[in-house]
Amino acid sequence: MNVNTKLKYNTPVFKKDEPDDNYKFQPLPNPTGPYPFHLNVETIIPGMDTKKMIFHMVGDTGSLRNPGFTRLVANAMAKQYQGDKTHQPQFLYHLGDVVYNHGEVSEYDRQFFIPYQQYPGPIFAIAGNHDTDVNPEARIPYKSLAPFVKVFCAASIRPVDFSLVKGRQTMLQPNIYWTMETPLATIIGLHTNVPKYGIVTPEQRNWFTEELIRANKQKHEKMLIVCLHHSPYSADINHGSSLEMIAFLEAAFLETGVRPAIVFSGHVHNFQRFLKTYPDGNTTTYIVAGAGGYDELHAVAKLNDPHFTNENSLFSNVALVNYCDNKHGFLKIAIEKTNEGIQLTGDYFSIAHESVLEAEVDAVLVEQFTVNFPSKHLPAI
């Protein structure tokens, strides 16, 4: 899984000559909870350990055409949850695109509730572009994100009224963009809408800067994590990097003087780990983890592909450290308090594509990385 600089890019890329599809933007539903849209994880999982927490993270699990890989990934995470009790994840954080292609209520059972009926833990989520999109040919008209809100942003915990699968109940997220408070980390979840490279509303941008400032007041007690669906940096052949998301994040970081330890995203159907070095010597890790089940994976671009370029000053200090672009997979994240601060360890597990889709398979560890907060270090490539 090491980066091969002779054949493929070892930096982010932009895809050339992409059309503007911002007309696909969808208005957001009303919040279901009070401003500033915080959810304490202990509301859902009482008695969280104050020294160590473990959780799964994955994106783009839905699959309209072939749900086999969705089941494999879900089953592998469920097996980890039920296995080693000393390293048991406590929940799953979904990076968006739960349901393809238009977030329809009729697809939730097939693409989400059935594949994940064996996953024992709570599932939190941010919405992806496909969750947000609306099918113009739907038999029964619906508003953007209406099914997602019913599942993840309910006012109370109760059975999902439109699901035939029993067991999984609604989640209490207070808004489409929201912050999860945990004993060891503040996890800010953004919503980046439908267009290919994302859009963030001015209202959400103001909220985000306030959240960065608020989180910074606890920087010695909690790691700061940012999650969004559209990947700011990517070297893949389907999307490439999002200039919109890079500009949005960097402007907010510059305005507040606050940067997270790590940024997680989906949207791109592979795994990539980037390290961005800032002028002060500090780094932020950027992770793409969107290979959660959609049958089409996205390869990293080859150097001789004329459709891509890395000739941009925005990439001069960003390195693609590692990637896995030919297998589905998921993350297992551990955050632990140490004598030096707080350390995050990320394990990326993949599913062998040679497996029979209906069989139970073991996930294979293919990448492990650590992030310390606060810290000052240079990339080890």
Image: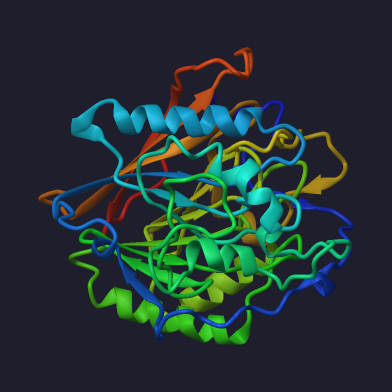
Residue 205 shown left or right of residue 80 in the figure: right
**Residue 80 at x, y percent in the picture:** 35, 29
- Which image quarter holds the N terminus? top right
- Compared with 362, 162 (above or below) is below
Question: Is residue 234 placed above or below 103 in the rendered structure?
Answer: above
**Residue nearest the observer in this picture, 277 or 74:** 74
Name the residue: 30% across, 56% down: 376
- Total of numbered circles in the picture? 0
Residue 46, horizontal then vertical, whole percent: 19, 58
Question: Which residue occupies the foreground of this view, 136 or 227?
Answer: 136
User: Is there any visible trace of residue 267 in the rendered image?
Assistant: no
Is residue 119 visible to the viewer in this orientation of the structure? yes
Colour scheme in use: rainbow
Q: Is residue 107 left or right of residue 186?
A: right
| Image quadrant assignment for residue 173 | bottom left
Which residue is found at the position 38% from the left and 64% from the top?
Answer: 157
Horizontally, residue 303 falls left or right of residue 228, namely: right
Observer-nearest of 260 and 80: 80
Which x, y percent locates residue 230?
Answer: 63, 58
Image: 122 above or below 211: above
Which quadrant would residue 54 be assigned to in this image? top left
Q: Quadrant of residue 279?
A: bottom left
Q: Residue at x 57, y 31 (%)?
A: 71
Front-most of residues 73 and 229: 73
Residue 84 drawn at (x, y percent): 24, 26
Q: Residue at the location (14% across, 51% down)?
A: 51
